[in-house]
Image (spheres, grey):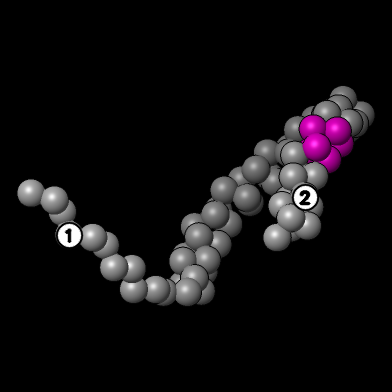
Amino acid sequence: MGEYQGFFGTGVTVARTLGPLVLTSLLVGWGTPGWLLLGALTLAASYAMGPTARWAAGTRARRDVKRPAPVP
């Protein structure tokens, strides 16, 4: 379990390290085409969220959770 959490935790560090480098080289180095590419990637990611969320909800294990009765 700890290995998975450690690996998951590296994602934030990698994003904070490589994110500015990638965006700077994309937007400053490529100019207008870089901005258009960033916009296209953002648009594609936003349209992919709905199907991805439906797929994740459909493949999640369904469990019957017994909730305690409310206290009067």
Please provide percent x and percent y for residue 45.
Answer: 63, 50
Q: Quadrant of residue 27?
A: top right
Residue found 47% across the figure and 74% down from its top: 61
Query: Residue under circle 1?
Result: 69
Please provide percent x and percent y for residue 14.
Answer: 83, 40
Which tag, 2 or 1, sits closer to the chain's start? 2
Drawn side of residue 24 relative to residue 69, left or right: right
Drawn side of residue 50 relative to residue 21, left or right: left
Report the number of numbered marks: 2
Closer to the camera, 58 or 52?
A: 58
Do the residues under discs 2 and 1 have CB atoms within 8 angstroms? no
Q: Quadrant of residue 37?
A: top right
The CA distance from mark 2 to mark 1 is 38 Å
Say which element carries label 2: helix
Disc 1 packing (10 Å; few <14; some 14–19; many ≥20) = few
Residues shaded magenta: 13-18
In this rendering, which labeled residue sits more in front, label 2 or label 1?
1
Q: Is residue 14 magenta?
A: yes
Disc 2 packing (10 Å; few <14; some 14–19; many ≥20) = few
Residue found 54% across the figure and 54% down from its top: 49
Q: Amino acid at mark 2?
A: Gly
Query: Residue under circle 2?
Result: 6
Residue found 33% across the figure and 68% down from its top: 65
